Each structure stands twice: as C-alpha cells, then as structure tokens.
Amino acid sequence: MPTLHWLTREEDLKAAGHAPYRLLEHMETRGDADTENMLIRGDNLDGLKALLPY
C-alpha cells in the first residue's frame, strides 16, 4: 500500500498524537434526518479525531 512521505512527517505525526479528542456537538438537522452523513465544520485534525469512534 502506498504511503505519503514529507520532510517533517515524524514531527507532524507526533503533534497529531498530542491533539485532544473532541466530541461532536449535535446541531439541528437539515434535509433528510434518516441519513448517516455528517457535516463537520471546524479544524480538520479536530474533525478527524472526533470521527475515530465511528
């Protein structure tokens, strides 16, 4: 499987491990309420960390 490599990869991976886990805050639904899709607004790393349980 291909992997990405960049100059500061090791430091970036360590920094990502120190980012705190965030809970998603439920907002009013728009459109079809029966869908499993989510719209997450915010920082990419925070959003990805919040999706780990899913």
Image (cartoon, helix red, strand yellow):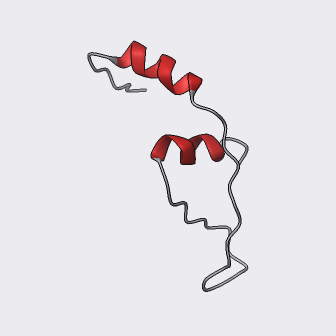
Q: Quadrant of residue 28?
A: bottom right
Q: Quadrant of residue 12?
A: top left
Residue beneath the point at 67% across and 71% down: 27
In the rendered image, the residue lying farthest to the left is 7
Taking 39 as reference, is 22 left or right?
A: right
Q: Quadrant of residue 8?
A: top left
Taking 38 as reference, is 9 left or right?
A: left
Residue beneath the point at 31% across and 20% down: 5
- Please state, as top left, top right, bottom left or bottom right, where the N terminus lies in the image: top left
Residue beneath the point at 67% across and 37% down: 21
Q: Nearer the viewer, residue 4 or 42?
A: 42
The answer to whether residue 41 is above or below residue 29 is above
Image x and y of residue 39, in percent: 55, 66
The answer to whether residue 4 is above or below residue 50 is above
The answer to whether residue 11 is above or below residue 17 is above
Image x and y of residue 40, in percent: 55, 60
In this figure, what is the number of numbered marks? Answer: 0
Image x and y of residue 20, in percent: 63, 33
Taking 35 as reference, is 18 left or right?
A: left
Residue beneath the point at 70% across and 49% down: 23
The answer to whether residue 16 is above or below residue 25 is above
Taking 26 as reference, is 2 left or right?
A: left
